[in-house]
Image: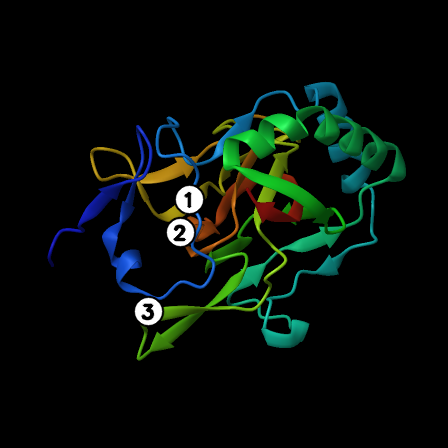
Amino acid sequence: MNPKQLEQISNYVYCDSFLNSLEIETKLLPNPYHDYPFLVIKDFFSKEICDEIVNSKIKDNDAIDAKVKSENYENHIDKKIRKTKIYKLDKKYRTLYDKMFKLHQSKIEQYFNIALTTSTKIQVLEYKKDSFYVAHSDDSNMIMDNDKLIGFKCVVPNRKLTSVLFSTSYDESSSFNTFSGGELVFNYLYDKNGNQIKFKPEAGDMVLFLSNPYFTHEVLKVKEGYRLSIVQWHDALVV
């Protein structure tokens, strides 16, 4: 197998040059002089608030199976692609979330050179043992030819930016608010040694990244524990 050809897109991150051979409708990358092409906000929520949310969802039976996006928003359930549950975020925490997001909004917009306009409803995503989500782009579907990726088709153009707030922490030790496995992997992003970028969060971390195919990602299968994240997608104008 030929080694991947990598192109530098920030001080410490490289992307698979294969992407540049494809016609990507929504190509957008942040400032290449940033250390990373994604933004991590530490302590967006305190760990105490995160634990409150976890405890409330453990007791909550009002969940639905997460769907897979398709054209014209005709989404469907496919547990071979995505095995997770969706909850609503309680009003108390939605209010706090909105307050904290507005506090960080100017920093976010400056980092990605965008002006945020509208946002989707907040989703709380639950991953228990053996839950996962295969590689996907948040704004596009993969176009495959005999299991070979040949392109992307944008199906959700109003997704410009993705935000993921973690309510539980990656930790090999088992607890009600930790999980092992379940890493967030960016499939086409690598460090200088050619290792895929994997994110192992702490509760309260928010990671933000552009929703286009350069930031194709997956959630690895959870080995043990309870992975809970709060996800939202944002439309924006490029400035």
Mark 2, Cα crowd under 10 Å, few <14 / some 14-19 / many 20+, is: many
* Rendered view: 43 above or below 216: above
- Could you tell me which quadrant the N terminus lies in? bottom left
- Chain-order first, disc 1 or disc 2: 1
Q: Amino acid at mark 3?
A: Leu
Tag shown at residue 149: 3
Which residue corresponds to the image point at 83% horizontal and 46% vertical from the top-left?
60
Percent coordinates x, y for residue 214 in the rendering: 40, 51
Mark 3, Cα crowd under 10 Å, few <14 / some 14-19 / many 20+, is: few
Tag shown at residue 29: 1
- Chain-order first, disc 3 or disc 2: 3
* Rendered view: 48 above or below 229: above
Measured in 3D between alpha carbons, the distance from the residue under mark 1 to the one under mark 2, in whole angstroms, is: 8 Å
Element at label 1: loop
Regarding residue 137, the answer to whether it shows in the image is yes
Q: Amino acid at mark 1?
A: Leu
Color theme of the render? rainbow
Give the residue number, with chain letter if any, for mark 2.
Answer: 214
Element at label 3: strand
Quarter of the view holding residue 165: top right
Mark 1, Cα crowd under 10 Å, few <14 / some 14-19 / many 20+, is: some
Percent coordinates x, y for residue 133 in the rendering: 52, 56
- Chain-order first, disc 3 or disc 1: 1
Badge nearest the viewer, 3 or 1? 1
Percent coordinates x, y for residue 118 in the rendering: 73, 48
